[in-house]
Amino acid sequence: MSMVKQTIRDDVQSTQAYVVAPSEGMLKLDAMENPHELPEALRAELADLLKDASLNRYPVPTLAGVESALRASTSIPTAAKVMFGNGSDELIDIIIRSCCMPGDCVLSPVPTFVMYAVSAQWAHARFVGVDLKPDFTLDIPATLKAISVNQPKVVFLAYPNNPTGVALTQAEIVQIIQAAPGLVVVDEAYEAFAEDSFISRLLEFPNVLVLRTLSKLGLAGIRLGYAVASQPWIEQLDKVRPPYNVNILTRVVAEFALNHFEVITQQTRALKDNRKTLSDSLRSLGQGRPEFQVYDSHANFLLVRLNQALEVFESLKKQGILVKYLGKAHPLLQNCLRITVSTESENQQFLNALQQALAQIDAKAA
Ligand SMILES: Cc1ncc(COP(=O)(O)O)c(C=O)c1O
């Protein structure tokens, strides 16, 4: 047996690496990115700031400028504390490692964002997924029962959920918070595209943390997420955070972008409008196709169920358009595709390609 095989954990060896689909030259509608960049004039200003960043120094330990820009642009309760991460992915990992000893439970309704289960696995925690109902709303009795049986240290609620786009009701969130014996993480990665947020209610409860990210706001490349919670939670979690986890380039870009939050708001508002147009167009494209279903979304993507989704995915790919095929991710997602909402012209490009894909499939079947 090789030294690698003898040394690396068995569960690591039997796991596939997270695959980021190759996308060079393609229209990328698979990863919920914001299609807009900062306007040219702002980018030039930002380049000047980056020129003066002290790359030879470790980053300063606090992100005070980012935090005050954030507090000015979002409704973080004044008494709540903020902790930053290298994307919210890192914060999910820190939360689980801070709370769970081997064998402790992490629970979430599923299907949901995969990193909750992945981070639980690497922490030797036990991930319990509670199936959503077929319409992707919460199965409250099953969830409450699973909480009571498994006594999770951490419950993750993606609000709105990825990959379904469905949002829990706040009454459901409260029911879960009150039933949970440990921390409830309300993951608001898609808050900018939703109608509601839980952040203002955070401090009503002793066991809630709200997770946010700049990734869906046109800043996926800088990797910055943040956790908002009462002081005692952040004080403990901060011990597990690696020092210097947010690099200086991220800090400079985030502070600059957040100080121009009106640009971000304008972009997200346009994407919300485009979501409506795209879902309307998809629904009319699906007319006469009994299996074709477009789910209502509160995020910057749409979940669509249609016949032969894998063939449609492949045909789109051949036409240079990358979406996410979810058919293998969970039994409830059979024949589902997830499509990021983009600009009007990119959405139209996608619709044209989809029409072509459906026509090809129909012709084969005829
Ligand atoms: C629900 C949810 N939480 C967190 C993340 C991770 O975001 P980040 O880019 O900040 O790591 C994603 C990314 O898709 C997500 O869908």
Image (cartoon, rainbow, N blue to C red):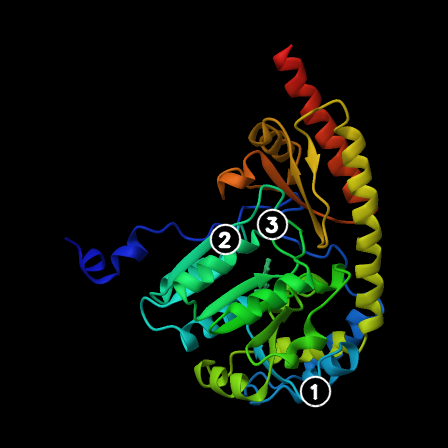
> Residue 28: where, in percent of width, then height?
66, 47
Task: Identify residue type, mark 2.
Answer: Ala
* Amino acid type, label 3: Pro
> At numbered mark 1, what does the secondary structure look like: helix, strand or loop?
helix
In this figure, which residue is indicated by the disc labeled 2? 142
Q: Nearer the viewer, mark 3 or mark 2?
A: 2
Residue contact at pointers 1 and 3, CB within 8 angstroms = no
Most foreground residue, 58 or 343: 343
Badge 3 element:
loop
Measured as percent of width and height from the top left, residue 158 is found at 60, 60
Tell which circle, 3 or 2, labels the residue nearer the N-terminal end: 2
Q: Residue at x 35, y 51 (%)?
A: 15
Disc tally is 3
Please, which residue is most extreme toward the left here?
A: 1
The residue at which mark 3 appears reads as 163
**Ligand 1, what quadrant?**
bottom right
The three-letter amino acid code for the residue at tag 1 is Gly
Report the front residue among 24 and 108.
108
Residue at which label 1 appears: 65
Residue 224, position as x, y percentages in the image: 61, 72
Residue 120 in view of the camera? no
C-alpha span from label 1 to label 3: 33 Å
